Amino acid sequence: MELILKNDDVIHLLQSIKETNSSYTEAKEHEIKTFAASQTPACTLVMCCDSRAHSTSFTFNPENNFFIVRNIGNQYILNQGCIEYGVRVLNTPLLIFLGHTGCGAVKASMGDYSGLHSSIIREIDHLALSIKKSDINSTCSETVQWRDAVINNVNQQVELAIKDFHDLRNNKSLAIIGMVLDIDNSRGEGHGKISVVNLNGETDPVKLANHEFVKSFFA
């Protein structure tokens, strides 16, 4: 057999793809047929492409519910067309930016990333601009600064989206929400816990916790 990869450990992963897909089609074939002709998602979701952050952390049924856009640092500008498509063509009433603690892209943007490949630099450049606009307390520990940068980045992405979708916001046909998946528990709420950090530009934790809309789904 022709050698394709020196590392044959990944064969197990490839085998699991086939096995899992077989189980998936057996269990969901009828459901898949119901949306085979068209999609009607309720949410356009912008996530980081980090391998530790997946839809399995918040849904068992992502199919036809989430129009998912992924890039490093869950950035708006990198996939603006995809996001516009979800919001304006698919008419999703929700636009969610989901960041995560321990984000390597955010960490890179906080320091010197000039040694990275040029294509990666271009993508982090946008993120670095976002981080530089943030108000991060430099007297805090590196871990706290990193955590706060993740949250502030989500807020920056929400802010950019609010400007472009102000018409939909004004007629109450779109809600823009910022969330953070706490992978490393630096927010202290538990590993893997998701929390709301922004609702249509509101970032005050107390106001968010007491907001009726947030309480309706994150009580």
Image (cartoon, helix red, strand yellow):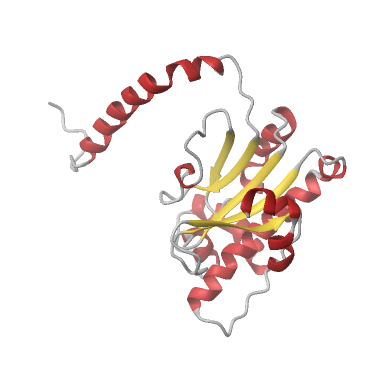
Image-based side of 29 in relation to 130, left or right: left
Q: Quadrant of the C terminus?
A: bottom right
| Viewer-closest of 14 and 168 | 168
Residue shown at 76% from the left, 57% from the top: 201
Q: Quadrant of residue 93?
A: top right
* 16 vs 198: above or below: above
Location of residue 84 in the rendering, given as x and y in whole percent from the top left corner: 71, 36
Location of residue 173 in the rendering, given as x and y in whole percent from the top left corner: 80, 38
Residue shown at 68% from the left, 32% from the top: 85
Location of residue 61 in the rendering, given as x and y in whole percent from the top left corner: 50, 33
Residue shown at 73% from the left, 48% from the top: 161
Residue shown at 67% from the left, 33% from the top: 86
Q: Quadrant of the N terminus?
A: top left
| Viewer-closest of 73 and 122 | 73
Location of residue 122 in the rendering, given as x and y in whole percent from the top left corner: 57, 53
* 98 vs 183: above or below: above
| Viewer-closest of 37 and 210 | 210
Image-based side of 80 in relation to 167, left or right: left
Extreme-bottom residue of the structure? 139
* 213 vs 207: above or below: above
Image-based side of 42 in relation to 140, left or right: right
Report how many numbered discs are placed on residues in the image. 0
| Viewer-closest of 128 and 24 | 24
